[in-house]
Image (tube, helix red, strand yellow):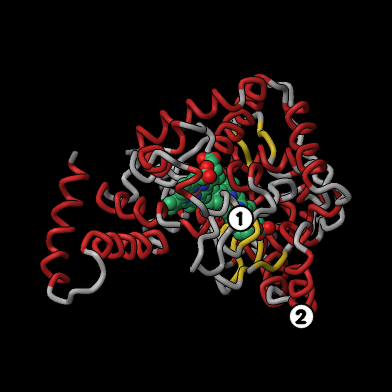
Amino acid sequence: MRKTARFISTAGVLTTLLGALGTAPQLAAADAELIAEGKKIAFDRKRGNCLACHSIVGGELPGNIGPALVAMKTRFPDKGALRAQIWNPTAINPNSMMPPFGLYEIMTEAEIDKVVEFIYSL
Amino acid sequence: MYNIALTASLVALLAGLPAAVQASPSDDLKSFREYYMKRFPGIPLSEYKNGVYAINADARKSWEGIEEFPPYEDALSKGEKLFNTPFANGKTYASCFKNGGKGIRQNYPYFDSKSGLIKTLEAEINECRVNNGEKPLGWKKGDIAFISAYMASTSNGKKINITIPDDPRALAAYERGKKFYYTKRGQLNLSCSNCHVDNVGNRIRSETLSPSLGHPSHFPVHRLKWGEMGTLHRRFGGCNEQVRAKSFPAQSQEYATLEYFLTYMSNGIEVNAPSSRK
């Protein structure tokens, strides 16, 4: 719920900002903004640092510990399952090498939301 | 947060390793070694004295270039000089060790039945100093690393030979080190084994993860990143901190028992110290 509310309000701000420019459809513009922010967080070594383990399009020197993150919509028809993997991978695989980004507060909930949007766009 | 970390780790440990927890040290050694032999077929046990360069041919070339003019040469000769310089009371380090301190690295660390503790080579270097009226040295770098490196270098080619005597305290020390090794810790929730066993040979970013098999054989090392020489416990501390866990003090029993476990796992591999690393 909280997540949806934030999404709408962010989209609202962007609508106001971008509305005047009359470019892409408004929701798509909001998406693009979230995705761009998510990408920044995901690539930041101090926050997501996903490239330590995953190859992701647009990221340099990726590790190869986890699977390449591609075709995520096919892999995760349910976006919630994708978020769950990022929030606490050890719920699915107790010995997972992937850090529990939500459970151990490595990223904030808002940051995770943005990263999910980015990963889901891959 | 660390409470959560510990609980999760124990769950992971229990879920992942029910059989291994009860295994005897020699069973552990056998399966530890076999795991790497299967993972890297064709690489003999004797190669594991070279750390990551045993399994990464590309990195090995540039490493071999560096080793032609080793960056630790200075430190090594300082170590030799320090080792041979008498204390104020006229005695030398040689007086504190078996065989005058030469060719003994492969037997460290060992279980000391008097104190019930694990003794590392560095611990005994400082003990020697204190017993002879000198101040102890800092643990992680500088003179202690130089002396330890020199002493290890006189043991090069000798095979690591750690024993676990028939004493419940020795076995407990081994088990403690083993548990430390397999326990997930830190905000990133990673165990030593997650990186150096489960993902050995994989890349974390551009860094190839080295096998733990043989880890203690080539320490102390000179690291480019440090710009100097450091001890094994300094490296343990670094690997703890990189998963955002609190490191333990060098020469704490946490690290001494970890070294005991890891060195026992490396039995049969030649001492090959010091060495250079990125």
Residue at image point 36% right, 65% down: A40
Question: Is the C terminus of chain A in the top left, top right, bottom left or bottom right quadrant?
Answer: bottom left
Q: Is residue B20 visible?
A: yes
Residue at image point 41% right, 56% down: A121
Q: As shown in the figure, which amino acid type bears the numbered disc 2? A: Phe
Label 2: how many residues lie within 10 Å, few (<14), some (14-19) or many (20+)?
Answer: few
Mark 1, residue position? A64
Point out the residue furthest to the bottom here.
B69
The image quadrant that residue B265 belongs to is: top right
Q: Secondary structure at mark 2?
A: loop
Labels 2 and 1 positioned on one and the same chain: no
**In the foreground, B47 or A114:** A114
Q: What is the x, y in percent for residue A110?
A: 25, 51
Mark 2, residue position? B69
Q: Give the chain letter at badge 2.
A: B
State whether residue B68 is above or below residue B95: below
Is A85 on the left-hand or right-hand side of A14? right
Q: Give the chain letter at badge 1.
A: A
Q: As shown in the figure, which amino acid type bears the numbered disc 1? A: Asn
**What is the count of numbered marks?**
2
Residue at image point 28% right, 61% down: A28
State whether residue B214 is above or below residue B191: below
**In the foreground, B38 or B48:** B38
Is B58 on the left-hand or right-hand side of B254? right
Mark 2 in CB contact with mark 1 (< 8 angstroms) = no
Q: Is residue B129 visible?
A: no
